[in-house]
Image (cartoon, grey):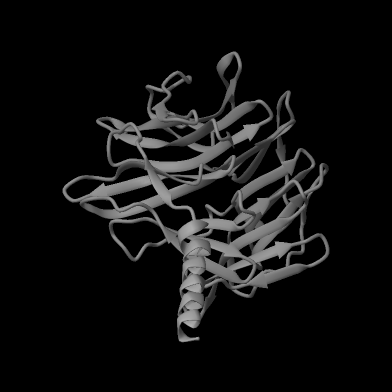
Amino acid sequence: MNGLRAVVVSLVIALAAVVSPATAVTPSWSALPVPAAAPPVTVSDLAARGPDEAWATGYEQAADGLRPMLHRWDGTAWSRDTTFPGAGEPGWLGKAQIVGEEVWIFHNRAGEGEILRRSAGGWSAVPLPQTLWTYQDFTAVPGAAWVVGEDDTGLKVLHHDGSGWTEQSTPDGVLYLMGITARTATDAWAWADTSTGTTILRWNGGEWRDAKVPLPPNANVHTIMLEPSGRVTVGGSRYTDGVARTYLMSWNGHAWRTTYPPLGDTHTEDLVRGPDGALWLPVRSDRAFQSKYARVDGRRTTFSYGPERRDAIDVKPRALATAGFSLLSFGTVETYGTKPNLMSERLGG
């Protein structure tokens, strides 16, 4: 009998080892080589169309100032793109958007704002109708684009309808727009600083209105993620007694639900929906030689680390994007004795 029980116990242990999620299911992050830029570099955004196309934007430090920086992922390797208008001139690249079959990127070209557009015929540029002091954010969808910022007269919301630019007004009391995103040409969202605190606005195709989102008290908004299904996710932080606490709000079509994942004061700007259906975002790592990512699935939050990097003293994923069945990360790594340069990591694929 004792011999039979020993056999059964051995089989149970063996089966547990075979089906253990930690060893058989959980994928791991891997490092992807990236052509070096002139450090210190800053990464702005990452957008992916699928497993074979992604674009990372930012800027590097040249001898006479900032230079725009653009890298392309082709499914196999990262390469640098210097074929866009103004690639060798002072300036920087901001948010990148996949718009139908095109790629749209905000470009500050020596202080002048424009939208870079890449189609099958190559790159072209759409200049803004006026120069702004500050270019805060940009978003684009088929048939529409928005640029928000300020000039000497105050807040500016510039709207492109596919043929030309117009200036849009916002509700009374709006002082500043901190960010903007859109699902369609008639459904755009923005988060604003107003005379009564942080407010979320919504464009319905005719005007901007208060979206009446019940934000937590004393809350900031870092990002709004709009999905084709109609789901909306708001990420930000709430201050209580001087301490910031990350929150996530989700709209399921009927009601708002607020949760407080164990993320500390993480900035949620780089929040994405992963190929597994969960929410992913980079977080501050407790290991100098490894990046760290959070996976939020309902009320469950788990963490994973990127590959170990020899001599690294600071690894910072700056942007995430879903590329087919994998997650792509783009950011910077600083090693002992050097300034921050580019790094990329992939989960799955």
Q: Position of residue 36 (x, y in %)?
A: 30, 33
Residue at the (67%, 56%) spot, across then down? 174
Name the residue rendered at 44%, 60% in the picture: 304
Q: In front here: 273 or 250?
A: 273
Instruction: Spot the residue most to the bottom.
Output: 1
User: Does residue 86 lie above or below 75 as drawn?
Assistant: above
Q: Is residue 241 visible?
A: no
Quadrant in the rendering for residue 196: bottom right
Q: Nearer the viewer, residue 152 or 52?
A: 52
Report the number of numbered marks. Answer: 0
The x, y position of residue 140, in whole percent, is 66, 36
Q: Quadrant of residue 97?
A: top right
- Image location (x, y in percent) of residue 155: 61, 47
Give x and y (percent) for residue 178.
58, 53
Classify residue 229 as left or right of residue 42. right
**249 w.r.t. 63: above or below:** below
Q: Is residue 86 visible?
A: yes
**Nearer the observer, 246 or 210:** 246
Left or right of 12 on screen, residue 190: right
Residue at left 20%, top 45%? 338
Q: Is residue 15 above or below residue 155?
A: below
Q: Residue at x 40, y 62 (%)?
A: 284
